[in-house]
Image (tube, coloured by chain):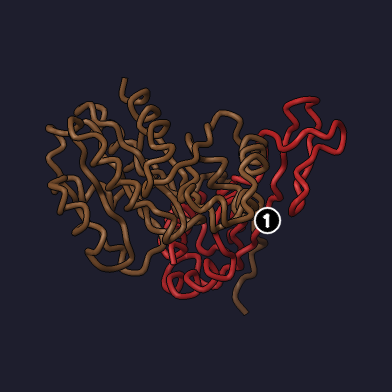
Amino acid sequence: MHELSITEDILRIVSTHAQKAGAQHVTCINLVIGELTSFIDDSIQFYFEMLAPGTPAEGAILHFRRIKTRFRCRQCGQEFEPEGRNWVCPECGALGGDVIAGKEFYVESIEVT
Amino acid sequence: MSEQATPSRVPVVEKLLTANEQVAADNRDYFAARHVMVINIMASPGAGKTTLLLATIDALPDRRIGVIEGDVASQVDAEKIAETGTPVVQINTGGACHLDAPMIRRALPALPLDDLEMVFVENVGNLICPVSFDLGQSYNVGLLSLPEGDDKPYKYPAIFEAVDLVVVTKSDLLPYLDFDLEAFTELVHGLNPDAPVLCLSAKTGEGMHDWLHWLEECLA
């Protein structure tokens, strides 16, 4: 249920940027969400439909770009995507790595008229 | 038909959750000004968070400890802590699955912070959502009880990546379970090589020394 406050945050950011651009309507909101964050597309969509009416973002399409988790091997520097129970570097066989992607959570851009 | 303008793209690239992060930064300053160390404890429901806190309070009678309890509902945990004479404030999230920085800020006036050295925040029992919300803590500690299984880092990587210490609780159950502590530790370190992994039983006292030592090191 924390998606409610997230959606309020999205609307605040979107309204500010739409206003700055001198736009009347926001037609599309492009969001980037890493796999390691705990935010659910459907839930954001649900709250958006509840909160957007009456704002410049009313009727806008939410576009979610999900980012897969990526590790960088600490032994050999190879970058790879961990899958389920396989966290082993495909290059050298070391376990795990530094998380270099998967924690993203931002509004990338909006489309306005 | 009204004029149909071609949509134009406006780059934004603005992080979400910044409102929470700003309040968390304020909380962090507030704690630092009072020289209070804050430990955010995250774990599943039933992992033994309150039991570990009670054992810690009992083991450190000379330390000035305060507790913030986070639960969806009830005062159950706060009452247990209050019985020890420790200052405690209960936050009921009213359904929310995690604590956030504004909730902590609202709870602070209920604690005598000027008289405290460390505050434990017992987050809502949940391995997922609390990770995304900075509270202004000094350290994050993740608890995992033996019955939960040694494969949890695969399923909930974010929490094991975010913590400064992992405490495996209920070590007295080790003879009865197939928990591979070595494999678990290796997996945690695959994700987070800097986080020590301790194993203890707040019930028997086994391993408590390592936990208390870690706390004292952080306080020093």
Quadrant of the drawing holding the N terminus of chain A: bottom left
Q: Which of A86 and B144 is in front in this view?
A: B144
Which chain does the numbered disc 1 sit on?
A
Counting from the top left corner in percent of width and height, residue B40 is at: 37, 43
Counting from the top left corner in percent of width and height, residue A87 is at: 75, 44
Counting from the top left corner in percent of width and height, residue B104 is at: 27, 48
B100 lies left or right of A74: left
The answer to which quarter of the image holds residue B29 is top left
Q: Specify the farthest residue to the bottom.
A: B1
> Neighbour class for label 1 at 10 Å: few (<14), some, many (≥20)?
some
Q: The red chain is which one?
A: A
Q: Is mark 1 on a helix, strand or loop?
A: strand
Given the image, on which type of amino acid does mark 1 rest? Answer: Arg
Quadrant of the drawing holding the C terminus of chain A: bottom right
Q: Specify the farthest residue to the front.
A: B175
Q: Which of B164 and A34 is in front in this view?
A: B164
- Residue under the point 16% across and 53% down: B82
Q: Specify the farthest residue to the top.
A: B220
B40 lies left or right of B63: right
- Does residue B68 sit above or below B196 in this rendering? below
- Residue under the point 65% across and 47% down: B180
Q: Can residue B9 be seen in this view?
A: no
Q: Can residue A59 be seen in this view?
A: yes
A101 lies left or right of B56: right
List the residue tagged with mark 1: A65
Counting from the top left corner in percent of width and height, residue B7 is at: 65, 60
Q: Nearer the viewer, residue A8 or A73?
A: A73
- Residue under the point 78% across and 27% down: A77
Q: Which chain is brown?
A: B
- Does residue A20 sit above or below B213 in this rendering? below
How many discs mark residues in the rendered view? 1
Q: Nearer the viewer, residue B48 or A14?
A: B48
